[in-house]
Image (spheres, rainbow, N blue to C red):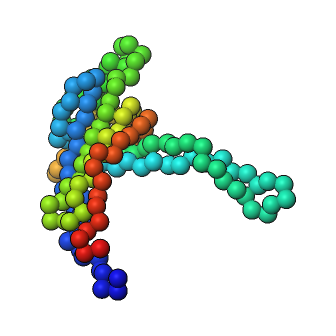
């Protein structure tokens, strides 16, 4: 065990991956994606009980949230807003992302986020002095997730 060291080539590069989005059953590559992150927070109930000087905690659920940066180059997200505004029903959104660096021994991580709601969708972005296009940012929440592929330990571990 003393000779085991982390090798930098086994740390996956964040640029090696992609995302897909399914809106109302229509699946497509999320080609405008610039950044995607998702986390699960453990919701807790915390209380200091009589006779104890320590507050105790109990896991009572999970909350999925994340963020996404994307280039505003399709009307898909604007169409989501229009559908919700017209019908009062927010469209079903699933986001799938994977991380797969071929130079790393750890392999692939692939996650599917279900029942996603983008919290901020740009309608229009115009800027006189901009020399390049800036990505738009949106927080998101999701109601469930599945892990399709997991990283594995490197051979040298």
Q: Is residue 13 visible?
A: yes
Left or right: 134, with 59 as reference point: left
On screen, 52 above or below 97? below
Quadrant for the N terminus, please. bottom left
x%, y% of residue 100?
20, 55
x%, y% of residue 31?
17, 41
Quadrant for the C terminus, please. bottom left
Q: How many marks?
A: 0
State the residue at coordinates (23%, 28%): 76
Q: Residue furthest left?
A: 102
Q: Which image quarter: residue 26?
A: top left
State the residue at coordinates (40%, 18%): 89
State the residue at coordinates (27%, 49%): 149
Task: Return the residue nearer the eye: 101 or 121.
Answer: 101
x%, y% of residue 145?
38, 40
State the residue at coordinates (19%, 65%): 104
Task: Return the residue nearer the eye: 33 or 127.
Answer: 33
On screen, 5 above or below 88? below
Task: Return the residue nearer the eye: 116 or 120.
Answer: 116
x%, y% of residue 70?
25, 43
On screen, 153 above or below 26? below
Q: Is residue 119 visible?
A: no
Q: Residue furthest right?
A: 51
């Amino acid at each position: 065990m003393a000779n085991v060291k982390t090798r930098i080539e086994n740390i996956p590069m964040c640029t090696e991956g992609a995302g897909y989005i399914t809106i109302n059953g229509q699946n497509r590559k999320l080609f405008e994606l610039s950044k995607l992150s998702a986390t699960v927070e453990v919701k807790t109930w915390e209380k200091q009980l009589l006779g104890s000087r320590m507050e105790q905690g109990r896991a009572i659920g999970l909350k999925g949230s994340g963020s996404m940066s994307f280039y505003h180059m399709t009307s898909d997200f604007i169409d989501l807003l229009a559908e919700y505004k017209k019908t009062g029903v927010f469209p079903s959104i699933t986001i799938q992302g994977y991380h797969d660096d071929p130079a790393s021994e750890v392999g692939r991580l692939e996650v599917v986020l279900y029942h996603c709601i983008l919290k901020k969708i740009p309608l229009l972005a115009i800027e006189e002095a901009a020399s390049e296009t800036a990505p738009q940012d949106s927080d998101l929440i999701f109601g469930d997730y599945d892990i399709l592929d997991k990283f594995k330990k490197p051979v040298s571990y």
